[in-house]
Amino acid sequence: MNAAILMLALMAAADEASPSRIPVDGRVGLFVGSNGAPNGREPLQHAEADARHMRRVFVELGNLSAGDAHLLEAPTADAILDAIKKTPAGTRLLVFYYSGHADSRALLLEGSELSFVELDRALASAGTELRLELIDACRSGAMTRNKGATLGERLQVADERGEGRVVISSSAEWEDSHESDELGGSFFTLHMATGLRGAADDDRDGKVTLTEAYRYVYGRTVESTISSGAGVQHPSFNYTLSGRGEVVLTWPTGQGGTIAFSDGDYVVVDAASGRVAAEVTSPNTTLAMPAGNYRIHKRTREEVFSGTVVLQRGAAISADLFLRDREAHARLVRKGRAEDPSFSHAVRVMAGVRGRVAGGLDRAPMLRAGYELALPWFSVMPYVSGTLGAELSTPRLEWSTHELGAGAIVSRSLDFSAFTLRGGFGAEAIRISQSESSNREPARTSFGSALAAHVGFETRPWWDFFLLVHLEAALYVYRATDAAIEPAGNGEIVTRPTYRGFFGLGYEL
């Protein structure tokens, strides 16, 4: 009896000391996100959400079971080390993902640090055949936060156990990385997840390999950060592999459904969370997505198309079939839509008439050319203008009057489905010159200004072109001169109301 009890106790101890089971398909994942910040740094907003996002991709498409995909949010250094130590024997691929603060020597967690040396030692001791380390290390910022770590070569291990190790870090050793409030996460993680869902599958064989994933995330991250004030971000790739063919990370073929994209720039937003789920720029791409509701926006040269899709498990749909809402670029900019750039611009050429100002300043044909910068809430249009000659005849003399001006209009727009109404105010510096055809009188020149209230009507663009009608109530303020009395002298300041009307053509750049 005592021997049987002793035998059972020994068996229980052995079971407790050994892994409970071999992971499904030999894959284990550890996904770490830490928004917290050490003293002196600003907490991050999206690191923990990025970890959840990456875990979901590998569980859905990477042959990683939910029970073997461990999520650590805001952990201590000891918690990370303990989770690594629990890697079961028989693990062939260990995926380690981290998003959070770091510096040149350690992962910086809230209340603790984990040095790269200690992290490397723990991951090497796990005894797996292959380790894939995805490091999206951050430091703080505002709308686009600087996320920094000098990774690269510093994360290589001199004595690996098993067949290999791959490190993909979010930036080069001397660079910062970026996260975006508009995207709701890191550029690097968003593009890596999009690539793993199928955008990186260059040969369309239904598998995303390590090489394809890195090539995709490198190109898209550089492109997304090239206009960032914090600098361009270049993901780095370090590896030690032996006796191994191409490593397949995901098989984007089948849980959930698939969405096909044609030619254009697409943004896919999870309707429930409002988080950007994918960003697609490669033509003829198919992504595997979880079942659910998505808002999809497609940007073309002329306009942005939008729509909502309901993706069911096993369904295969084309995104373009659901993009029924259309808006021109400038309209989206004025509304401050996140999927559109922060501004757009256009040129405008107009012809019209200026009403009578005073004797010698009768009604005259007028030309105007301007450049409009459309910002999220208002537009600014600097312009130059001029009138053709206005003739004035007296019993003895023939006068010709010309006007040149330079000014700017600030306006707000109200957009409808087929046209745009705008209103605003403008100010202009003017030069008025009069010349007598027979040179019996000296030329007269006066300088002044014009203030105007402005309303306009514009059509929707066709192939980037649009028609426009602008009307203005203007007040001229200028110095009148009497050449017969004071050829070089100054006259009185006068104010004269008038009108200006234009019909023209615009082109969106």
Image (cartoon, grey):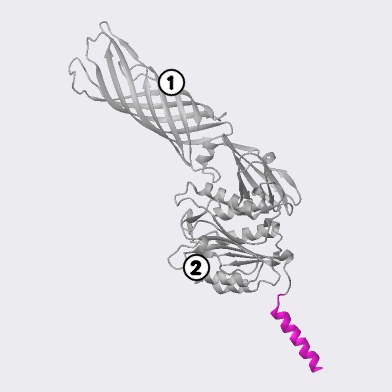
Query: Residue 124 location, x and y as percent?
Result: 60, 70
Q: Is residue 208 above or below residue 388?
A: below
Query: How many residues crowd mark 1 within 10 Å: few (<14), some (14–19), many (20+)?
Result: some
Viewport quadrant of the N terminus = bottom right
Q: SS for tag 2?
A: strand
Whole-percent x, y for residue 10 in the image: 74, 86
Q: Quadrant of residue 70?
A: bottom right
Identify which amino acid the numbered label 1 is placed on.
Answer: Gly
Q: Which mark is residue 352?
A: 1
**Residue at the spot of label 2:** 106
Q: Are marks 2 and 1 in contact (CB under 8 Å)?
A: no
The answer to which of 485 and 231 lies nearer the viewer is 231
> Is any part of residue 470 visible from this angle?
yes
Residue visible at 21% across and 16% down in the picture: 483
- Counting labels gives 2
**The residue stretch that appears in magenta:** 1-19
Dominant SS of magenta comes to helix
User: In the displayed structure, would residue 255 be above or below residue 305?
Assistant: below
Query: Residue at the location (38% across, 32% down)?
Result: 408
| Viewer can see residue 76 | no
Q: CA distance from mark 2 to mark 1?
A: 67 Å
Q: Is 124 located above or below residue 294 in the figure? A: below
**Left or right: where 37 falls relative to 210:** left
Left or right of 195, for residue 343: left
270 part of magenta stretch? no
Give the camera-side residue of 235 and 107.
235
Q: Secondary structure at mark 1?
A: strand
Choose mark 2 or mark 1, whichever is in front. 2
**109 with respect to 399 (left or right):** right
